[in-house]
Image (tube, rainbow, N blue to C red):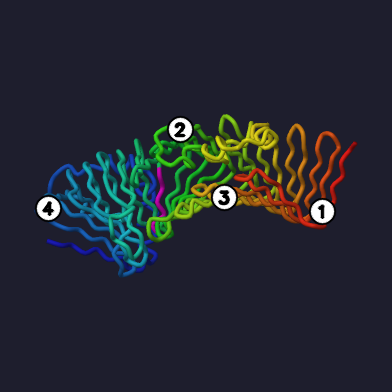
Amino acid sequence: MSIKLRSWGIGAVGLIVLLVGFQIMFDAEDFLKTKVSSKKVEMLDSVIIGYDKSNKAWEIKANYIWGGANKYLFRVEELDYGRLFDPDGDVLLDEIKAYGVKVNSQTKTIVATNNITARFIKKGDASTANAITIRSKALKYYGFSKKTYLNDNVILQTGSTKVMTDEAVLDNETSIVTINPPFWIHAKGYTASANRMVIDINKDTSKLNGNVSILRKANRRTRDEREDRFSRLSTRLMTDALIHKRLADEDVMIFLSGNIDIRQPDKTLKGGAGKYQRSLKRFVLTQNVSLESDDLRWLFRNKRLAKLKNKKMRAAIGDPVKVTADKMVFLLDKSHLTLEGHIVIKQKTKTVRCDKLIFDDNKGEILLIGSVYIQMDDDDTIRSEYVRIDLPNEEVYFESQSEIEIEI
């Protein structure tokens, strides 16, 4: 059995009815107290569909639906299946199951009070892959405001990532979910928090704003030596804003902006803007980039360090270092590092300046390019447009026009 409820233009009389209904629309508690004292109608194995401007707005299906004296109120003890739609009539919230449901077809209000489960649907994509599932104690849908409120012990989950909060608000017109604190994000090996979280379902985008903090636990079980150099240590990332964008083929882009501070026990990396692409394992950091590290051993493979005999090179790799630049590009799986713009490298015994630096652990070379200036603590200096450090052969090559000054 199906009952279709359509919205018509509201005249003066309808406006009065609308004003009277405001209290019900905005106060779920009063709505729940509305009595359905005596059964006037019972519907078995039925569907009720609500419309807005000729498009579906909501749909509920249950084995047993009943109503009382108020012809606009329906009661469902156990909701088998429900859906909410966006203004275009596309499914937005699907597979809704709940207990203790009340429907007011006049004010276009749905309230569920226990064991809510559902999942968000991306526009034009009903697949379950990467879908966000929902659990909460209460759900309130208001047709007039086109908003859905999830309350009490709310859990949004996709894959292994869970967002836990007291309230999440879905704007049915924009397909955007807003989560205000307190909330917590838990993923495999990660925890995160921020002042605010916004999820754009149709754009596959999540944004964290204000005091963003992400903690990744140390992982000593990685199979890749390069990855192990980073994952074996705990990492804390702090920034003003973070955007997580899901791309095609399970790829992910992460954008960071404002006061980026990435810390491990032995190193600190800072900048103003950054982005990371998972498929490329490529991290780009710009705007006043700085790196402070206890040493540079984490850049090199263990075999490379074991073969290195040159004492000065070993000392340079083992000494504390501070690096500043305009831009840093790091390929994590290849140990390939590029620095660009106003580069300054300071260690105990030397200062290096240049326009561009390329470190390639696979090739075993370091290139210094453009206005290279090296000053040692004994006042020896080197000026060149190009310097190549050959790590396997432990040799340094200079451009033919280089200027070298040695203090005697």
- Give residue 389's position: percent from left, percent from top: 67, 48
- Mark nearer the viewer, 3 or 1: 1
Percent of width and height locating residue 319: 67, 31
Compute the Cα span from label 2 to label 1: 47 Å
For the question of whether residue 69 can be seen, the reply is: yes
Which amino acid type is marked by label 4? Val
Instruction: Calculate the distance from the C-alpha at mark 1 to the C-alpha at mark 4.
Output: 95 Å
Q: Position of residue 390 (x, y in %)?
A: 64, 48
Separation (CA) of disc 2 from disc 4: 58 Å
Chain-order first, disc 3 or disc 1: 3
Identify the residue position indicated by label 1 in the image.
402
Amino acid type assigned to the residue bearing label 1 in the image:
Ser
* Mark toward the start of the polypeptide (2 vs 1): 2
Region in magenta = 168-172
Residue 349 x %, y %: 77, 33
Residue found at the far top of this picture = 265
Mark 4 vs mark 3, CA separation in Å: 72 Å
Q: Secondary structure at mark 4?
A: strand
Quarter residue 248 falls in: bottom left
In this rendered view, identify the residue nearer to me: 290 or 181.
290
* Residue at which label 2 appears: 217
Mark yes or no: residue 211 visible: no
The tally of labels here is 4
Badge 2 amino acid: Lys
Is label 4 in contact with label 3 (beta carbons under 8 Å)? no
The span from disc 3 to disc 1 (Cα, nearest Å) is 26 Å
- Tell me what residue is drawn at x 25 percent, y 39 percent: 114
Residue type at numbered disc 3? His
Q: Residues within 10 Å of mark 4 (few under 14, many from 20)?
A: few
Q: Quadrant of residue 51?
A: bottom left
Q: CA distance from mark 2 to mark 3?
A: 24 Å
Residue position for label 3: 336
